[in-house]
Amino acid sequence: MLDTLDLDRIVDRLSRSRLKVESLFSALVLSGIVVVGASFATLVDLRGRFPVFNAVLDLAFAFYAACFFVYLLPQRKRLKSLSQKQITRLFIFLTLPYFPVSWTSHYNLGYSQDIPWIPFTGIKLAFLCQTVLKSGDRRVNGVLMCGFAIESVILWRHFNYGAREYIQLAGEPWYTILFVIVSVSLLIYQDKMDQIQRELFIARIKAHIYESIAHLFASLKDRSNTPLQTIEISIYLLSQEMGKDKAENSRPLQRISTAARQLKELNETFDSLGPEIISEIASLESPEQLLKKIRNNLKSTGENPPTST
């Protein structure tokens, strides 16, 4: 049965369930971050000399994200009511409004020559959020990050930010480029780490199965030991009562003796297999290797190897 056990299917189902939980919490955290960030931006707009329209737009974005937060908060206890695609769409719909919000803010401030400000601050934070939080599909995060990078390039060229001395003194556009490089690197790293965690998860499941088999062998050996001793004693007593000649010619007694000998050989097989399997659990890489090991040991003792069902 080991060679037909579909571990990959089991692990895929468990991995999808874990990813679903992580995606839901990521969307919930992202909505909370947007609410706090947009509210803070609204206060900055009102306290500074920025256009009032910027404050209204940021406040509307904060209210939009708050609606998502209120909707997602009770979904933690009703996770089965949402599919992975629905959670991914919620993550996308929560991120997409920032593109026009960011463009409008840069547009209003781009023509204000008397207000010193640093561009791309919100876009940098968006890069970090897309790197850390999971939408359910890393490709979605990558596409959104590419969209923010393209928007940054268009804004830089359209408003000619390079001609403004205070922006150059702030280290732009190099800080934004650094954020892009670091964010993409971290996104690739997290994708690789997810693959490694999945492989480790499979290894833990396999190790648990191997350990269960070893304990099963030890239990079978213990359970068969007492009946085997009883049968051997009974054969000896029957042989003494029947006499040597009659015992050798008794077919039922010979069959019982043959069965007892086979049971004893099987018991010895359990003795050799149990500790060996336990000692090799960490080194075995797949159920097929374990099954092959079991078959080889049974062949060497003269038993028929088990067949897959």
Image (tube, rainbow, N blue to C red):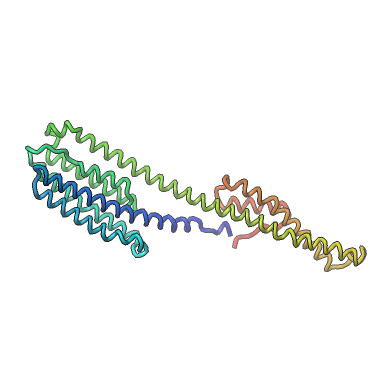
Residue 14 appears at what percent x and percent y?
44, 57
Residue visible at 55% across and 53% down in the picture: 208
Is 245 left or right of 192, judged from the image as shown? Answer: right
Q: Tag count in the figure?
A: 0
Which of 167/153 is in front?
167
Which of 222/296 is in front?
222
Q: Give the quadrant of the N terminus.
A: bottom right
Residue 26 appears at what percent x and percent y?
32, 52
Residue 21 appears at what percent x and percent y?
37, 56
Which of 59/209 is in front?
59
Please tell me in which quadrant of the rendered image residue 222 appears: bottom right
- Does 111 sit above or below residue 23? above
Residue 202 appears at what percent x and percent y?
49, 51
Q: Give the quadrant of the C terminus.
A: bottom right
Residue visible at 9% across and 38% down in the picture: 115
Please tell me in which quadrant of the rendered image residue 80 appears: bottom left
Residue visible at 13% across and 41% down in the picture: 158
Is 102 left or right of 239, judged from the image as shown? Answer: left
Residue visible at 20% across and 56% down in the picture: 64
